[in-house]
Structures are given as structure tokens and as C-alpha cells.
Amino acid sequence: MTLENIVVVGGGLAGAHTAAALRARGHRGTLTLVAAEPHPPYDRPPLTKAVLAGTEEDTAFPTDWTALGVDLRLGERAETLDLHERLPGGVLKTTSGSLAFDGLVLATGAEPVRLPGTGRQHLVRTLDDVRALRPLLRPDARLALVGAGWIGAEVATVAAARGCRVTVVEAGPAPLAAAVGAGIGALTAPWYAAAGVTLRCGTAVASVDTGGLRLADGEFLAADVVVVGVGARPAVGWLDGCGLEIARGVVVDASLRTARPEVVALGDCAEWWSPRYRRHLVVEHWDTALKASEQAAAALLGEDVRHDPVPYFWSDQFGRTVQYAGDHRDADRVVLRGSPEDPAWTVLWLAGDRLCALLAVDRPRDLVQARRALAKGCAVDVPAATDPATALRDALRPV
């Protein structure tokens, strides 16, 4: 099947790179990119780092959309999707009209979760979000930050460095508890205190009110600025009733195809089948979206592909680079490589002697060596692995 008219919905990393990959792979028909934001597609990881800190402003991808022949529709939001019943393709309805297509890429990303209440709450999902927040991070400003996840830690890092009086409120028992478990997350708690940030775990928020937070126990926490970073959900609500299978995200197979082969989905809005982990995954991270863009373009053009990466992400917080690779949900034990009191250390998650995942704090070589081994499958020589002086690759063996 030759596609003449492809529409890409989503102007983030996944959508933008898929559009470029479609041209690189030979698509010469019409190519339209629909982006809800008014800005040309840009990179998001710097938002909570250099952009919020004010040391970087332009993170737009260096793509010449005109030269690529891409019709870039900025500030245009997808509203509904109508798929033809017996023919490939359909019609995408947006805030600016209707677009017919015979090939469709769904890359609408995720939407941040908001808290109840009438008070002003700042989010850090978009460039405009960060530009609105940045001038408020003044010395001695009282900042209440809800959520001690990856985003919360990065925002707290920047705000503390700019002289704010930061209080982080976390409903879970420890920072990063949802991501890496309470035991490992607790190892990062001293970083907050060292940066002058007050961390309150096990503290739920009832609402964001004028002047601060109303906590679940009735206490009022006064604040000049409230930032909410309690997670995001795949932006798929607009697809209700379209005929595609929607669970947590758009359900796709290992080639990123939906049940309609002319429709693929990727990035934060996709729930893709992983043969490696034998389950559907939603991985809301930059590296997965980047890898998926080439695969999605190839799949849409009819190539035989399989998207099955080892999840990977990183965070810069409190002067440390924290990197994670793998999936630790099947692990039955945790091994420390070095001490959390040291400047650099690593956590290994094992199922039996098989390596499931790794968290490296300022140990990039550990990450690189383990990530390569995870892709192939490996077992761990635990006595060797727990010795930080031993190269991690020397403690890993194929299985």
C-alpha cells in the first residue's frame, strides 16, 4: 500500500522525529504535522533544567520543515478521529478544520495531572509553563512543590539554587517511591536537606488554595508559588469512540501498529507490546520516544520492524546525574554497588542472578556497560558486582 497523505498528530519529540524519518525513508506524498503548541517542535528535557534556570532559551529541533516539505500546523489541537469503515484512512478533525489522511501517526504525548482547588498551580510540561514559572523563582520566595518524583526533584534543584525557600510535599513514603521503590528512593532524601529543601513525605494534598496548599490532615501550608508535579496521563481522551483500542494509552503491537495498519502510535501516548517483558508498556521518557520514531515511520511505510528497547532515562538533580535502565518489576532482590554515602554508587535489581535493572548515580560507565548487557540478557556475579573497584562488565555474563 502506497500512502499519499500522512498526518502526524503531535509536535513533540516522537511526532517531529517520525515526520523527519518518513521523509528520510522515502515518503514523497503530502505530510502534515499537527501540533497543539504554538512553538515549532522542541526538546523537553532541558525545560526543568537549563530553561527553568535561565541559562538556555531555545530548544527547538534544528529541522528545516520547509525543506522537508512538511505542512507544519502550529497551535492546532486534534479534537476527534473518524476512521473509514471499509477503506484505509479517515478524517482528523482539529480546532482549525478537517484533514483527510490515508496514513496516521498518533504522538500526542501526555497531559500533566492537576490537583483540586481554585488556587493557581504551575505545571512544568511545556515551554510556556516554564517561562511562566521562571520569573517567580526569586530569592526568599516560598515555593511549595507537590511531588518528589523526577520532575519535582529537578524543579526543586533549580528553585533552591535560585534562593527560593522550597518545601516538597510527597504523598508517598519516600522520593521516587513510585519509580524505584521506597527503599531506594529513601536513599535520595538526604540530597534535599543538603540543598536546603524541606522534604515532607507521607503528606497528601487535599487542594491547591489561594496562598498555598490545604493538606489532607487539614493543615494549611502557605506558599507564594505552588508547583504540581504528580505525574501525567497519556493524552488519548480525544480518541474516545474512534474504534481504536485504548487502555492506558493507544494499544499497539511490537511494530507500533494499531489494529488498523495505516495507524501507528508512539511516545507517551502509546501502550506498546514488549516481547522482552511479555506485557504492554507505557514508557514516558525521551529515549524511548526517540527510538520509536524510526520504527514507527518504517512500520507505517510497510516495513517489518519490532520496537522492543530496554527502557532508559536520566535525571539531573541536586548536582548528581541519575540514570536508570531496565525494568525492575520482576526483581526479587536489590544489590548495592558502593555506598549511598559515597559521591557515586549504583543499585542493581536481580531476579535470581539475572540482571533486571540498574540505577547509577554519577557512575556513567556502570550504566553503559549494564545497558548493553540488559539488551542481550545477563547474569550477575554478585560478589564481583558489589565491589565498586571492579568494572561492572567483569561481573556480568551472558545467559
Image (cartoon, helix red, strand yellow):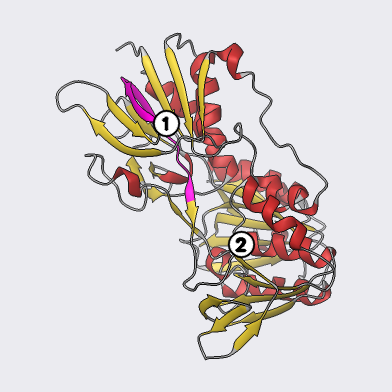
Who's the residue at 60% across and 67% down the image? 176
Q: Could you tell me residue 272's position as x and y percent?
A: 39, 42
Left or right of 52 on screen, residue 176: left
Q: Could you tell me residue 175's position as x and y percent?
A: 63, 71
Lower position in the chain sequence, tag 1 or tag 2: 2
Q: Give the residue number, with chain letter if any, for mark 2.
A: 122
Numbered disc in front, either 1 or 2: 2
Left or right of 388 on screen, residue 187: left
- Number of the label disc, if any, that sits on residue 306: 1
Measured in 3D between alpha carbons, the distance from the residue under mark 1 to the one under mark 2, in whole angstroms, is 38 Å
Element at badge 1?
A: loop
Decide whether residue 16 is among the magenta residues: no
Left or right of 162 on screen, residue 241: left
Who's the residue at 48% across and 35% down the image? 10
Element at badge 2?
A: loop
In-front residue for pair 210/371: 210
Q: Quadrant of residue 261?
A: top left
> Magenta segment range?
96-110
